[in-house]
Image (cartoon, helix red, strand yellow):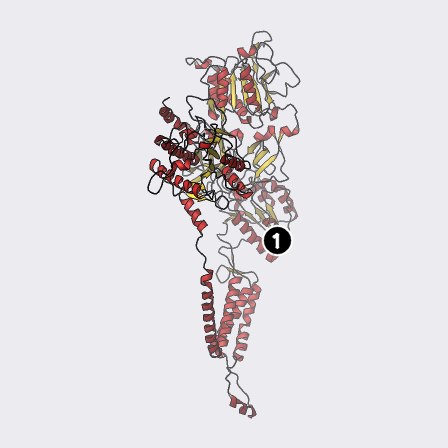
């Protein structure tokens, strides 16, 4: 510190130059300023006068003071002034041990933590002090030997927070070896405020003798997430905070695979409680889309919980071969299955007791797992449909029973013997059988089997070569209890006992619930991978797919990360070898999360270090290098000195005339520049006519017609669409703007949903570029109504070889036109606004052709045929525009053929339906409109 101020210098020896200031003062007083020059011709006479000794003029006192101040500031700047708001950490003499926590708990304040480490290493670099640099999450493979501070700085800049807790105990052996060679001069530990289990602190105190230890603490620790659960009502997690943290609330977000937020909740902590619960009360279908839960604003791996298919709620269908007695539910296998599955799945049961109808009904409801309890032989059609569902990824779980013992179909994982084995019968046991430990490659591996669980009866499997590979659970005598086999993308699982307590007490135990949970966990996630016939290494290990870094971001797996055995994955914990993230393949993966249900954020406990430990806070702010400030100030003083000398030398008077001339020239130049900018020839109009047309078309819905170049046809089109526009405004909620004529070759078509194109036989065929624009318009959802206006000259079929029809065929041959059909009675066009059965114009006999839809059998409860979009093309010969045309005085311009007012009214109604259909599509096919349509139709 400097004179009690938080000011230090990187090169304090340069301050000795301040002693030279008196010498500089003496020299400055002897050096006069430059004399003022005045042109005086008689001065030539004075040259012959004898010279006498002259006393130089002394500098003004204020100029001398200015230059002394400039010299002092330059000396301060060269000495490297640094402003420190806190006392520097004592790094001692000899080797400095710098220990840095870089686990996930350092991610939130890593910038401050690494900044403090950089300050210490920079100080050590300036003093030449050697440093032993150790990061607590990098493991024992890092170099734990003294090295230069420059090398340690390079390591620090490459260091990042790791996605697992600091592994401090792993450093003990390396640090003990370094201490045996030479004790450190001081130990500085940049901690993350958390305590880890182990003997690291005790070992550190023992190996370093009486060396002082400074521990920096006090930075914010990120919040954590753990204990993910997906129960019947909500997806819930536990939010964990550090006991020293005073944060009262946390915003938790649920995201899908694309990173879109599906929901967020506010979790509030009670006073003194480091944990709280966040619940996402969303529909199960929406919860099943959740792929990641994170705490908003907490960029740390521990603040993320990844969700794989094993956490998603399955929709499970239940079918029992027995009749369900509601008065005696304990006799029904469905009762046990419901209570076992309900906490972590959504149950669906068929309303129809006929299995042939129940199975398809459940499949249509989107079930993931189907449970059949004592269903013997399935009908052939049902068996084929169920097989197809399993091959597409479904999971079929079957329970044995009296019907299964009497024979089954082929949708079982193993061949069964006829009959069953029971206590006291043929092939019987003398004592009830207990369950054997689950195989390591079974989904049930690791579950604890209660000793009281026994089996009295079972169906037996035929012994085959692949039976051991297909066995997930067995009895102590080696006979299978649960078998499974892959079938396409899904799997078939068979319990060789009943789902109720008649054959065993397994359904009464907790392990039964966990077994069902494990089956659901592997369903639809390469469900049969662990029971595949070829027992290859690729099926028994899960390679790293996408892993989290210390900030909770996905990244590519590091090369040192190794695959995890599928059987060991449930017991795996986040570490340097197995960082948190996704393991497996894109087709099926498992999520390894950082925090487990029993993890906690413990406060730092330095009791093992005794009185040698000094706990201090991290610097509140970084030290400020003042060299730039002092050099800038010195430069400004130098400029002030130059101005003072200039003024004392009379420079202002010489500059007076020049400045006036320069000002006039600058004013003249600015005037000329302004005139050139506002030259009338350079003024650009704010908008062109094309831009105005585009603006008008976007602000109002307009009907548009194609300009053919024939004045008679174009006038009829304009008058017709004007009449239809007026009719729409009077009869509907739509108020279109004035109709507009379109040049297909140059005008933008995207502003209009419907184009009316009257065919002129004498017009030229559009060129290829125009045809491409028309095709793009139709592909992007636009509709073109082609009107040949020739029905009076055409045959009764509606199409003939009239000139207009031939011209239309010539135009359509280069367009991508879908198959066409006359408007069917159940098409949306017949009910878009008015209920119509025909679409007359000036003429009434030509059908209206639209895109052909898939043929659907008419249903009384579905009077509208649904389609996926609007027909891009319509064709008629009824001359719609002439029927709609109204003159300026409100009279109809063309008579209908025959002259019938009702036909003209229906022509307008046809136009309304066509416009509504082009604007709204097939919305009238929605189920919500069906009751009103049925009522209107009188059905």
- Along the viewing direction, whichever of 363 and 93 lies nearer the viewer: 363
Q: Which residue carries the number 1 mark?
A: 149
Residue 591 in picture, x, y percent from top left: 55, 33
- Along the viewing direction, whichever of 932 and 309 lies nearer the viewer: 932
Residue 122 in picture, x, y percent from top left: 58, 55
Q: Quadrant of residue 442?
A: top right
Question: Which residue extends farthest front?
Answer: 793
Would you say residue 338 is visible in this rendering? yes
Q: Quadrant of residue 75?
A: bottom right
**SS of the residue at dot 1?**
helix
Q: Residues within 10 Å of mark 1 (few under 14, many from 20)?
A: many
Q: Is residue 83 above or below residue 657?
A: above
Q: Quadrant of residue 714?
A: top left
Quadrant in which the C terminus appears: top left
**168 to the left or right of 853:** right
Q: Is residue 610 above or below residue 19?
A: above
Query: How many numbered tags mark residues here?
Result: 1
Residue 91 in picture, x, y percent from top left: 57, 53
Residue displayed at 44% across by 56% down: 685
- Along the viewing direction, whichever of 391 and 640 lies nearer the viewer: 391
Q: Is residue 127 above or below residue 497?
A: below
Residue 546 in picture, x, y percent from top left: 58, 37
Q: Is residue 111 above or below residue 847?
A: below
Would you say residue 508 is visible in this rendering? no
């Amino acid at each position: 510190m400097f004179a009690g101020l938080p000011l230090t210098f990187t090169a304090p020896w340069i301050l000795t130059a301040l002693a030279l200031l008196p010498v500089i003062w003496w020299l400055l007083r002897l050096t006069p300023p430059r004399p003022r020059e005045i042109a005086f011709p008689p001065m030539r006479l004075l040259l012959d006068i004898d010279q006498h000794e002259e006393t130089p003029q002394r500098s003004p006192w204020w100029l001398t003071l200015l230059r002394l101040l400039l010299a002092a500031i330059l000396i301060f700047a060269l000495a490297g002034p640094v402003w420190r708001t806190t006392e520097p950490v004592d790094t001692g003499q000899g080797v400095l041990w710098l220990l840095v926590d870089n686990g996930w708990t350092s991610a939130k304040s890593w910038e401050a933590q690494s900044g403090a480490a950089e300050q210490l290493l920079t100080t050590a670099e300036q003093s030449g002090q050697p440093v032993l640099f150790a990061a607590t999450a990098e493991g024992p493979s890092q170099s734990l030997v003294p090295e230069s501070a420059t090398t340690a700085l390079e390591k620090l800049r490459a260091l990042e927070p790791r996605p697992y807790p600091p592994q401090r105990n792993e450093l003990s052996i390396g640090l003990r070896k370094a201490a045996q060679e030479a004790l450190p001069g001081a130990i500085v530990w940049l901690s993350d405020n958390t305590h880890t289990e182990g003997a690291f602190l005790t070992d550190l105190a023992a190996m370093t003798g009486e060396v002082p230890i400074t521990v920096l603490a006090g930075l914010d620790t990120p919040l954590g997430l753990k204990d993910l659960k997906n129960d019947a009502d909500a997806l819930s997690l536990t939010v964990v905070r550090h006991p020293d943290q005073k944060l009262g609330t946390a915003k938790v977000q649920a995201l899908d695979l694309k990173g879109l937020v599906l929901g967020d909740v506010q979790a509030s902590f009670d006073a003194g409680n480091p944990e709280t619960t966040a619940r996402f009360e969303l529909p199960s279908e929406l919860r099943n889309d959740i792929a990641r839960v994170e705490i908003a604003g907490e960029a740390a791996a521990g603040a993320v919980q990844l969700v794989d298919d094993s956490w998603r709620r399955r929709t499970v269908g239940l079918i029992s071969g027995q009749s369900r007695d509601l008065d005696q539910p304990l006799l029904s296998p469905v009762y046990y299955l419901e209570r076992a599955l309900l906490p972590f799945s959504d149950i669906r049961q068929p309303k129809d007791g006929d299995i042939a109808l129940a199975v398809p009904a459940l499949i249509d409801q989107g079930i993931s797992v189907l449970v059949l309890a004592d269903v013997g032989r399935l009908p052939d059609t049902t068996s084929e449909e169920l097989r197809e569902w399993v091959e597409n990824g479904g999971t079929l779980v079957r329970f044995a029973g009296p019907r299964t013992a009497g024979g089954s179909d082929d949708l079982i994982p193993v061949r069964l013997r006829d009959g069953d084995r029971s206590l006291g019968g043929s092939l019987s046991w003398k004592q009830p059988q207990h369950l054997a430990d689950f195989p390591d490659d079974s989904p049930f591996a690791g579950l604890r089997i209660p000793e009281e669980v026994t089996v009295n009866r079972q169906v037996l499997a035929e012994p085959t070569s692949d039976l051991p590979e297909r066995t997930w659970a067995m009895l102590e005598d080696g006979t299978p209890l649960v078998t499974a086999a892959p079938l396409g993308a899904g799997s078939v699982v068979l319990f060789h006992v009943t789902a109720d307590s008649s054959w065993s007490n397994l359904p009464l135990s907790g392990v039964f619930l966990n077994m069902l949970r494990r089956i659901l966990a592997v369903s639809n996630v390469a469900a049969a991978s662990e029971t595949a016939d070829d027992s290859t290494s690729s099926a028994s290990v899960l390679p790293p797919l996408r892993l989290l870094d210390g900030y909770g971001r996905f990244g590519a797996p590091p090369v040192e990360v190794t695959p995890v055995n599928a059987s060991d994955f449930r017991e795996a914990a986040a570490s340097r070898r197995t960082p948190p993230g996704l393991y497996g393949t894109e087709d099926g993966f498992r999520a390894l999360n950082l925090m487990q249900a029993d993890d906690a954020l413990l406060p730092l406990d330095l009791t093992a270090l005794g009185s040698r430990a000094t706990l201090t806070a991290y610097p509140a702010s970084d030290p400020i290098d003042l060299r730039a400030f002092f050099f800038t100030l010195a430069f400004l003083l130098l400029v002030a000195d130059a101005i003072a000398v200039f003024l004392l030398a009379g420079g202002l008077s010489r500059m007076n005339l020049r400045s006036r001339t320069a000002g006039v020239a600058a004013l003249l130049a600015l005037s000329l520049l302004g005139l050139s900018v506002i030259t009338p020839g350079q003024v650009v109009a704010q908008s062109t006519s094309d831009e105005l047309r585009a603006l008008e078309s976007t602000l109002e819905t307009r009907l548009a017609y194609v300009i053919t170049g024939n004045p008679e046809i174009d006038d009829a089109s304009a008058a017709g669409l004007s009449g239809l526009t007026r009719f729409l405004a009077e009869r509907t909620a739509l108020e279109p703007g004035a109709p507009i004529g379109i040049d297909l070759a140059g005008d933008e078509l995207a502003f209009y949903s419907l184009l009316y194109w009257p065919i002129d036989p004498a017009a030229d065929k559009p060129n290829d570029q125009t045809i491409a624009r028309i095709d793009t318009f139709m592909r992007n959802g636009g509709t073109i109504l082609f009107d040949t206006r020739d029905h009076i000259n055409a045959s009764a079929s509606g199409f003939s070889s009239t000139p207009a029809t031939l011209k239309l065929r010539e135009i359509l041959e280069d367009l991508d036109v879908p198959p066409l059909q006359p408007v069917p009675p159940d098409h949306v066009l017949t009910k878009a606004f008015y209920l119509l059965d025909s679409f007359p114009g000036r003429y009434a006999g030509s059908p209206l052709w639209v895109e052909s839809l898939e043929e659907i059998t008419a249903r009384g409860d579905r009077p509208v045929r649904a389609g996926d979009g609007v027909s891009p093309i319509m064709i008629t010969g009824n001359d719609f525009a002439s029927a709609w045309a109204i003159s300026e005085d409100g009279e109809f311009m063309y008579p209908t053929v025959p002259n019938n007012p009702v036909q003209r009214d229906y022509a307008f109604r046809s136009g309304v339906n066509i416009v509504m259909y082009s604007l709204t599509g097939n919305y009238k096919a929605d189920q919500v409109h069906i009751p009103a349509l049925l009522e209107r139709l009188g059905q």
